[in-house]
Image: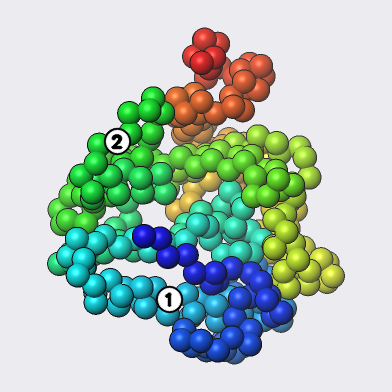
Amino acid sequence: VMVAPMYPHRGGPDGWHCADLQDEFGDQPIDPATITVPDFLPDIPEVREDIAGYWRAIGRYDACVGATIDAVNDSTHADETLIIVTTDHGMPFVGAKASCYDSGHRCPLLIGKRGGVSQHTAECVNWLDFQPTVCDWLGLPEPDDGIERVGQSLLPLLDENVTWDRTAIFASHTFHEITMYDPYRFVHDGRWKYVQRLNHSAPLPLASDLYAGRSWQAILAKGVEQLGERPRMHYIDRPATALYDTEADPMETKDVSDQYPEMRDRLHADLMQHRIETQDPWIMLDYQAGDPAIKDRTTILR
């Protein structure tokens, strides 16, 4: 069973799905003066108002999650139910959703089962792990359909003292809407992150909800050039590749490829190997550009 609340998606007369709604999920307006503005957005009144609406909608989302968990606990299947609570991307603001930055890819993830141990982990996981996790929980074999799958079950992380053998995660984005075409790939080992922006020379097309949002329209109208710790042009003019030290530079504002060439080359090779194994259709352009990581053309023709 999947429960998919519309909160906190953008929409409605105030920019969020929560204006003029009176239902069992309640409502708690947020004072914009109490907002903490993230490091990737400018601290201007319109951004504060936009984020206040976002937090208001999240309050409704939390109520939906609580109601769902209550329904499971009241059912006869609570002991055999695995609950996964997550989102599909980061905050729906520029510099987060539909961007290559961690502020767009780092999402909440809660997994619960009756009698489970309360614990927190900082291990590298991604949403490709959900399918093998569900198969593992249901005792089903992996589909025998010839498709290369790179996810792994997250159930071991629900137990204490488990050694997780994953050293990095990979991410792929092609477009948000058919008109919002911004293909990029990256590999992240928990500290170092190597990014390939495959169509970097084209103007950045924003997702329509971000573009029309109160924050971005105010940024455009006021000519704001600094989006928190990121220069606006750093967000719009994307380099073809970049290496970020997310420990020292969590906002990913400094490309350190030249300072750490061995790390750059190692992660580049890892990313290219992953793209070959998963039959990334963009890999042919890397081959045509003479990327030394693709030594044999036959490896990308399947």
Neighbor class of circle 2 (other Cα within 10 Å; few <14, some 14-19, many 20+) is few
Q: Do the residues under discs 2 and 1 have CB atoms within 8 angstroms?
A: no
Residue drawn 59% across the image and 81% down it: 18
Between disc 2 and disc 1, whose residue precedes?
1
At label 1, which amino acid type do we have? Answer: Cys
- 8 relative position to 79: left or right: right
Disc tally is 2
Residue drawn 24% across the image and 45% down it: 136
Labelled disc at residue 64: 1
Along the line of sight, the residue nearer the viewer: 147 or 160: 147
Residue drawn 17% across the image and 56% down it: 159
Neighbor class of circle 1 (other Cα within 10 Å; few <14, some 14-19, many 20+) is many
Q: Relative to 282, does residue 35 appear above or below in the rendering?
A: below
Instruction: Give percent across and percent down for residue 75.
Output: 24, 72
Looking at this view, name the residue that lies furthest to the front.
76
- 267 relative position to 150: left or right: right
Instruction: Give percent across and percent down for residue 278.
Output: 47, 28
Image quadrant for the N terminus? bottom left
Labelled disc at residue 142: 2
Q: Which quadrant of the structure image shows residue 143?
A: top left
> How far apart in space, not on screen, are marks 2 and 1 (Cα)?
31 Å
Residue drawn 61% across the image and 53% down it: 98
At label 2, which amino acid type do we have? Answer: Glu
Colouring style: rainbow
- 16 relative position to 259: left or right: right
- 10 relative position to 5: left or right: right
